[in-house]
Image (cartoon, grey):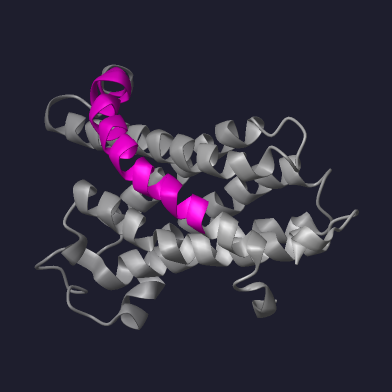
Amino acid sequence: MMRFFGTRWWLRWTFITLAGFFVGGVVGMLGGFLGIPIIGYPLALVIPGCQGQGAIGCFLIGSALGAGVGLGVSVGTAQWFILRSIVPRSWWWILVSALGWCGIAYTLTIMLYSAVPAPGSSDFGQPIWAIIPSAWGAIAQVTLSGALMGLFQWLILRGSLQKSFWWIPTNAIIMLTAALGVLGLGYNIGGLPGMGAFVVSFSPIYAIFSGIIFAWLRQQNRHPTSSDI
């Protein structure tokens, strides 16, 4: 599969996805700020335990969801420019990408504040392999969120690209890598703003490997052309 590295479709997908992340970094930041009053405040009103100091958690969740929507719309729109000539009703890709990245942002944020060892804890400063047993639940949630985004995107791809079910485990593995990255960096990420910076810095890994599988899927196209190579 690595022979698709550097092909025309890989280059197009990778660079346009990176462009989407570049724009998404700005849009996601704006979404993070807007997510506090639009999502966080209503959550604080209806969820038990979100009053007083507990409201901070709801504000963090609202900010993460808002940032995820902004990032997902940006990345999904960028990828749509490629998919629109391949997949019918490809505009759905933007919606499912927004929802998918929203879930990923949420689970990564929960992982950062619940599974990453804080200074003074017994696991702080321990190597990543020593922390994984206590953080496997959070890792699984991030991996599942990647698989779910892949599943919803597969529903769009399946009618146009053969073997597109491989899109699901690909996204799961990529997000598993992201979860391990968060766990490895640990407290150095520095809170929610740092998480946003981590996601953008992680974008080349997502773009490169999703580009490889996309180029491979194009090669399996039911009606291949010379432009697929």
Give the quadrant of residue 8. Answer: bottom right
Depth check: give the residue in front, 103 or 198: 198
The secondary structure that most of the magenta stretch takes on is: helix
* Quarter containing the N terminus: bottom right
Name above or below for residue 63 compared with residue 210: above
The residue at 75%/40% (across/down) is 87
Residue 173 image point, x, y percent:
56, 66
The residue at 36%/82% (across/down) is 129
Specify whether residue 78 is painted magenta.
no
Name above or below for residue 62 compared with residue 156: above
The residue at 23%/80% (across/down) is 126
Name above or below for residue 224 compared with residue 120: above
| Start-end of magenta stretch | 15-43
* Quarter containing the C terminus: bottom right
Depth check: give the residue in front, 66 or 141: 66
Name above or below for residue 80 compared with residue 178: above
Q: Is 28 on the left or on the right of 33, as rendered? A: right
Depth check: give the residue in front, 222 or 170: 222
The residue at 21%/60% (across/down) is 189
Q: Is 91 on the left or on the right of 70, as rendered? A: right
Give the quadrant of residue 38. Answer: top left
Specify whether residue 32 is painted magenta.
yes
**Residue sitting farthest toward the right:** 223
Residue 27 image point, x, y percent:
33, 35
